[in-house]
Image: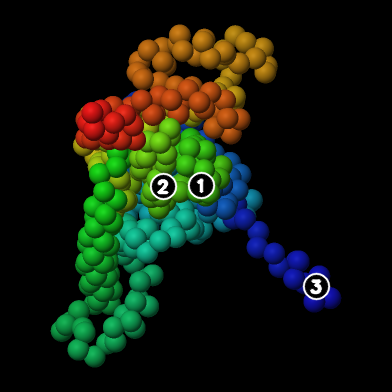
Amino acid sequence: MGRQKFFDTAIKPERAVLVGIITPDESEEKEKEYLEELEFLVDTAGGVTEKWFTQKLLRADRATFVGTGKLEEIKAYVKSEEIDIVVFDDELSPSQLRNIEKELEVKILDRSNLILDIFARRAQTAQAKTQVELAQLQYLLPRLTRMWTHLERQKGGIGMRGPGESQIETDRRIIQDKIALLKERLTIIDKQNATQRKNRGQLVRTALVGYTNVGKSTIMNMISKSEVFAENKLFATLDTTVRKVVIENLPFLLSDTVGFIRKLPHHLVECFKSTLDEVREADILIHVVDISHPTFEDHIRAVNETLKDLGAIDKPIITVFNKIDAFKPEGREEGQSLSLEEFKSTWMSKHNMPAVFISAIEKDNVEEFRALLYEKVKAIHQQRYPYDKLLYPDIESQDSE
């Protein structure tokens, strides 16, 4: 009986509905793409999406985001289907969050909060955990309600509360103190990481960048022959991983960084800027693109915008179009893909020079990628070390003559 009871109490995934608005600035097709991505985020967080709700508006309703009529429709579905969570595709203001929670009486999340939750699950190192906690507190501070009253016990009440100070003010001050402490901790970690980067010497540094879930970690494993965690989930990698790689006796450093995404919360980008130092300090960026994704062009733009914000858009970039085995060209029968020569003649190749087309999973065209990477690294290495014996083994014999 005990064994049967154990199986009966297995944790069930939370059932969710997604909510988005269609404005004059965003088409119905664009909102569909955003909600598909939001559904993938819910799946990554361990939930199951049951239904989408969309509403056409000139702008988001200031009180309820979608308007009272649509909110009533959502409420009826949530009640009848016993939905656990409602996820909104845009960031909700504190007042919107309060109004919606009061009306629907279930857990309410927006895109920012959902991404923060995934980051909290994925964080492994002290740096990533600190960055996530800081971002969470910065997100929650303006949304502070009575949910935070338990924090008062952490510092004790005697001597900590000013005359006439309300509980909510006490909690707000506690969170602000915690934010200051986390920022100090990140400063120390950043200094340690900067020291580590200096200790790596003057090896040429390359960094994998790209949208989340495009195969960066798989490529990292393939090139460096290491075992970096890779999974078909959004934000599978949060912590930057750096490996020393050798191609034809030429050593260089390869780093795998956190994936980018559209509508990434600003405070999250700010908190993770230290993690993205590997991108800013790299000599060469390897921009990985999932060519099989129907909106990969938007992904390219989102990554380029983030690189621009980081001040890294002018670095030498190799564009790697990954997952060619899953690419479905228009006008072809099921299962028919493009040949490598056909890929190279497309606009994708001509507008993203230099570009290479591979399948990291199937190991298709990997040697061309390695050769291109070698040539780019070698060019920088020659500038830095013009008399390196690894590249010019006959230098010593010439000098001796």
The amino acid on which the numbered mark 2 sits, given as a three-letter code, is: Arg
Q: Residue at x 37, y 12 (%)?
A: 350
Q: Amino acid at mark 3?
A: Arg
Query: Sequence order check: which comes first, mark 1 or mark 3?
Result: 3
Secondary structure under tag 1 reads: loop
| Residue 113 seen in the current view | no
Q: Which of the 4 quarters of the picture holds residue 30? A: top left
> Is label 2 in contact with label 1 (beta carbons under 8 Å)?
yes
Measuring from the top left, give residue 250's x and y in whole percent: 37, 36
Residue 203, quarter of picture: top left
Q: CA distance from mark 1 to mark 3?
A: 40 Å
Specify which label sits upstream in the sequence, 3 or 2.
3
Which residue is identified by label 2?
243
Disc sitting over residue 3 in the figure = 3
Q: Residue furthest right?
A: 1
The residue under label 1 is 226
For the point 65% across and 14% down, which residue is it? 336
Q: Measuring 42% from the left and 39% from the top, which residue is drawn there?
A: 246
Q: Position of residue 17 (x, y in %)?
A: 54, 46
